[in-house]
Image: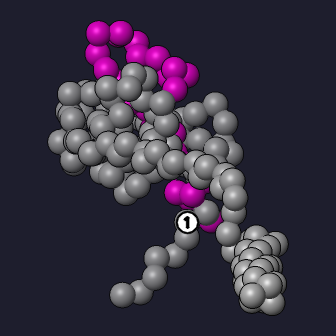
Amino acid sequence: MRAWVVLLWAAVATIVLVVLGIFGTLLASGRIELFPTPQPTVTPVPTVEPVVDTSYEVVILNATPQDGLATQMKDVVVAAGWPIDNVLASEAGSDDFPETTVYYLAPEDQAAAAGLAGVIGGALVVQSDTYQPADPAVPQLTVVIGLDRTAAGATPTPAP
C-alpha cells in the first residue's frame, strides 16, 4: 500500500511541475501577464460641423510674395455669399507664411471658421487671439494665405 502512496505523490508532483513549467514559459515569453498595465483610453476628438455663416467679417491677408492672392480669395468669399463690405483683402507683414490658415477668436466661432475654410478650398483652422476684430461686437474670421496657395507651392491635383 505504501508503494501506491509514493506512486500517487510522484504523479501529483509530476503534474504540478509540468503545469508550473508551462505557466512559467508563457509568463517568460510575454503571452500572459500577472499584472497587466492599464492601456490608456483614447478620448475621441470632438469634431465641429462646418457652418457657412456670412454674418462674420472676413479679413484676408496675403502672406506670400505672389501679388493678387488676397483679392482673388476675396472674390471667392464674396461669391459664397459674404457682403462685399464685410470682406477686407490686404497684404500681410510677411511673405513666407507656410500654410493657409483661418483664425478665429472664440470657441463658438470654430464652426464658422471651418465653414470658411471649406469655402476657400480647405485650410487649417486655428483658434488664436492674434487677430482681434476692429469692433468687438462684430465677429471676425481672419484668413492668412500661405505659400501652399502660390504657383510655386501648389501641389498638383491628381487626375481622376
Amino acid beneath label 1: Ala
Say if the magenta span includes residue 141. yes
Q: Which residue is found at the position 21% from the left and 34% from the top?
A: 54
The residue that appears at 39% across and 22% down in the rendered structure is 106
Q: Could you say where residue 147 lies in the image, as x and y percent from the top left? A: 61, 53
Q: Is residue 124 magenta?
A: no
Residue nearest the viewer, comparing 51 with 74: 51
Q: Residue at x 37, y 42 (%)?
A: 46
Q: Is residue 82 above or below residue 47?
A: above
| Mark 1 secondary-structure assignment | loop
Location of mark 1 (residue): 154
Residue 11 can be seen, yes or no: no
Can you name the residue that lies furthest to the top here?
A: 136
Mark 1: give few (<14), some (14-19) or many (20+) Cα within 10 Å.
Answer: few
Quadrant of the image containing the C terminus: bottom left
* 67 horizontally vs 157: left or right: right
Looking at the picture, tell me which residue is in the foreground, 46 or 116.
Answer: 46
> x%, y% of residue 157?
46, 76
**146 or 122, nearer to the observer:** 122
In the image, residue 52 sits, relative to residue 140, either above or below, namely below
Q: Is residue 55 visible?
A: yes
Residue at x 42% of width, y 48% of height = 44
Residue nearer the viewer, 75 or 47: 47
Query: Would you place residue 95 above or below residue 5 in this image?
Result: above
Question: Residue 97 appears at what percent x and percent y?
Answer: 64, 44
Residue range in magenta is 128-152
**Secondary structure of the magenta portion, mostly?**
loop
> In the shown orientation, is residue 34 left or right of residue 127?
right
- The picture quadrant where one finds residue 45 is top left
Q: Residue 75, how many percent across, how many down? A: 30, 47
Number of numbered discs present? 1
